[in-house]
Image: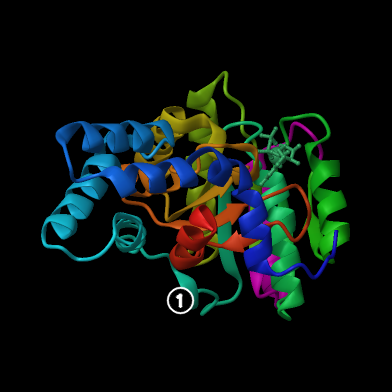
Amino acid sequence: MDQREGFFARLRRGLSRTRAAWAGRLEGALAEAGSSEDDWDALEELLLGADFGVHATQRLLASVRGSSRAGNGDGAVLLRRALADLLKENPGMEGRRYSESPWVILVAGVNGVGKTTTIGKLAHRLEQSGKKVILAAGDTFRAGAIEQLEIWGGRAGAEVIKHGPGQDPSGVVFDAVHAAQKRRADVLLIDTAGRLHNKVNLVEELKKMRRVLGKVQQRAPHETLLVLDANTGQNAVAQARTFQEAVGVSGIVLTKLDGTAKGGVVLRIQQELAIPIEYVGVGEGIDDLQEFDSDAFVQAFFE
Ligand SMILES: Nc1nc2c(ncn2[C@@H]2O[C@H](COP(=O)(O)OP(=O)(O)OP(=O)(O)O)[C@@H](O)[C@H]2O)c(=O)[nH]1
Ligand SMILES: [Mg+2]
């Protein structure tokens, strides 16, 4: 694969399963829609099938039906426009990042969703744009987690601050902020443990990390990114609610879009949670993370 394959091409490839499963059928249903109530029901079924969720599906349908009644053009164009409009309702941070240094980003999520991989990809992107990045090995729980982060640090060219396995993650965070301050790093990315079985402890640990961060650097963490696996649908929404209540979430990273045929989950998550999607993961490679761009998403979904 060409390493310099463009961002859009990667996104398009990441969405290929979704596109193959739904784009043609949606456009087909839209070409019919309007003649009877059954046609709209068929469209609704398709949107639910692509994992847009009930709330977003109703809003999309209302918008398309409204414009269609007003005679505002063909259904497929109306759906794209409605999708793009809804996706813009919760814009991400975009240009508002990195105004303080170190800019501290806490990365959370249940196990296996792609936290460590996302940190590696993000560190690479930042290093490529000339930022100095430090990684904190805050997952001291899972065997091999520290080594995994070190491998990513090596690939991205970012130093890793670590303690031993089983040590208190808040201690790692404390040291990592000091190291980032001393070395004048631009960004500190904090990896955390994501174990499913004792959620209470996980959440308590995250709360403690946040408290420690706030003490050693005002306003830190500047972002708390929650990583969600695009394949988990409704469960992802439930996970986000838990984390949102416990530690606050500034943005979502939606990973493994390339592994799902239900890319509608992007809109569902953004609508049901009212939390911006900041990044999407479209593969396992170091270049397979993108800032979420709603227009590019809509285009890649259909074309
Ligand atoms: N296809 C695909 N795989 C991904 C993506 N992001 C992560 N993965 C894979 O998902 C698996 C788990 O990734 P990790 O980064 O280890 O996940 P984690 O959340 O850190 O897991 P724990 O540390 O065990 O909680 C790995 O095999 C990754 O390569 C993505 O966008 N697409
Ligand atoms: Mg991990």
For mark 1, give the secondary structure: helix
Q: Quadrant of the C terminus?
A: bottom right
**Residue drawn where x is 78% and y is 38% of the image:** 145
- Measured as percent of width and height from the top left, residue 33 is found at 25, 44
Q: Which residue is mark 1?
A: 96
**Residue drawn where x is 17% and y is 60% of the image:** 67
Which residue is most to the left? 70
**Residue drawn where x is 80% and y is 70% of the image:** 4
Q: Is residue 175 above or below residue 240?
A: below
Which residue is most to the top? 197
Residue 5 horizontal side relative to residue 84, left or right? right
Residue 177 at least partly seen: no
Q: Quadrant of the N terminus?
A: bottom right
Q: What range is drawn magenta here?
A: 164-187
- Measured as percent of width and height from the top left, residue 93 is found at 44, 69
Q: Nearer the viewer, residue 59 or 91?
A: 59
**Residue drawn where x is 39% and y is 44% of the image:** 28
Among the 4 quarters of the image, the one containing residue 202: top right
Task: Give the residue type that dot 1 points to.
Answer: Arg
- Does the segment drawn in magenta span residue 184? yes
**Image quadrant, ligand 1:** top right
Q: Is residue 123 above or below residue 166?
A: below
Q: Nearer the viewer, residue 3 or 119?
A: 3
Residue 280 at least partly seen: yes
Residue 230 horizontal side relative to residue 53, left or right? right
Label 1 neighbour load within 10 Å: few <14, some 14-19, many 20+: few
Task: Count all numbered tags in the image, as a single digit.
Answer: 1
Q: Nearer the viewer, residue 207 or 280?
A: 280
Q: Nearer the viewer, residue 291 or 86?
A: 86
- Measured as percent of width and height from the top left, residue 277 is found at 45, 55
- Measured as percent of width and height from the top left, residue 300 is found at 54, 58
